[in-house]
Amino acid sequence: MDSPISSFLLFFAFSLPFVFGNSLDLFSSCSNLFNCGDITDVGFPFWGVGRPPECGNPALRLACEGNKATIVITEIKYQILKYSRQNNSQTLTIARTDYMGTLCPKKFINTTIDYNLFDAIPTSHNITLLYCSSSTVAGQFSCPGYNAGFIQVSPMGFSPCNMSVIVPVSMNFFPPVSDVVNSTEVLKAIEEGFEVRVKEDGGRCGICEQSHGVCGYDLNSNRTTCYCRAGNSIDNGACMNLQAGGVPSSPPGM
């Protein structure tokens, strides 16, 4: 009869190819960068379109629709107009797709940014769009079912209208104090989008990349992980590279 030690060694031997193979697959898959139209070379913490879920935060899925990059943030779809990465800082310029070409969306939803994922950037400010189904005053625009729409640049006080929607706009295209506001200017400002900066992960991805690993996301622990070329040999979030003779070398900075 086989001993417990023999059984364990047999199990371990059969398990190794699966464990290391899976890590190698994720190293390869997460090395792929997202590319769609003008938005190129996007990596961690994003995933989607050739980058499996293990490559990024579950809430940061990218899609490519008609050669345009999109992302859904708190149930609102945005088109990504610009993407930039400088050192470890990643910035997106995004615009609501439901306000592309119209001030009359199908649903009235306030813009809400998840600050667990993004940092605020003081380059934009909020405007409020008011939708009145019954108004004796001529509106600045109109929508089906709402005969008068108004644009409020300053913080909103009491409103007699049925619905209101808060939308951020860039200060570059629409200053916070405007003497004359019309629907054409507002629509253009909304379509130009506003900036958000991706929140850092505490430097864990940088440590991984310095050790020649590829950053990914552990869906069980909900945190950054590191995929290594030689399998899942990880020490303190970094890959343990092998020197000549198979001796592990310390990752950079360790």
Image (spheres, rainbow, N blue to C red):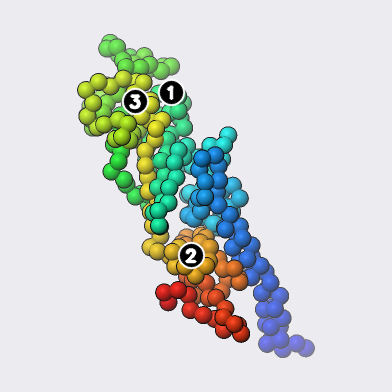
- Image location (x, y in percent) of residue 195: 37, 42
- What amino acid type is highlighted by mark number 1? Thr
Asked whether residue 187 is in view, the answer is yes
Viewer-nearest of labels 3 and 1? Answer: 3
Q: Circle 2 sits in a helix, a strand or a loop, which is it?
A: helix
Which residue does the numbered mark 2 point to in the structure image? Answer: 209
Q: Is residue 220 visible?
A: no
Q: Which quadrant of the figure has residue 20? A: bottom right
The residue under label 2 is which amino acid type? Glu
User: Residue drawn at (66%, 67%), measured in percent from left and top?
Assistant: 21
Q: Residue at x 61, y 66 (%)?
A: 23
| Residue type indicated by callout 3 | Val
Q: Which of the two discs, 2 and 1, sits closer to the camera?
A: 2
The residue singled out by tag 3 in the image is 186
Q: CA distance from mark 3 to mark 1?
A: 10 Å
- Kindly report the distance in space between the C-alpha atoms of the residues bearing marks 3 and 2: 42 Å
Does 124 appear above or below 102?
Answer: below
Between discs 3 and 2, the one toward the N terminus? 3
Pointer 1 residue: 102
Q: Dot 1: few (<14), some (14–19), or many (≥20) neighbours within 10 Å?
A: some
Q: Closest to the observer: 171 or 71?
A: 171
Q: Secondary structure at mark 1?
A: loop
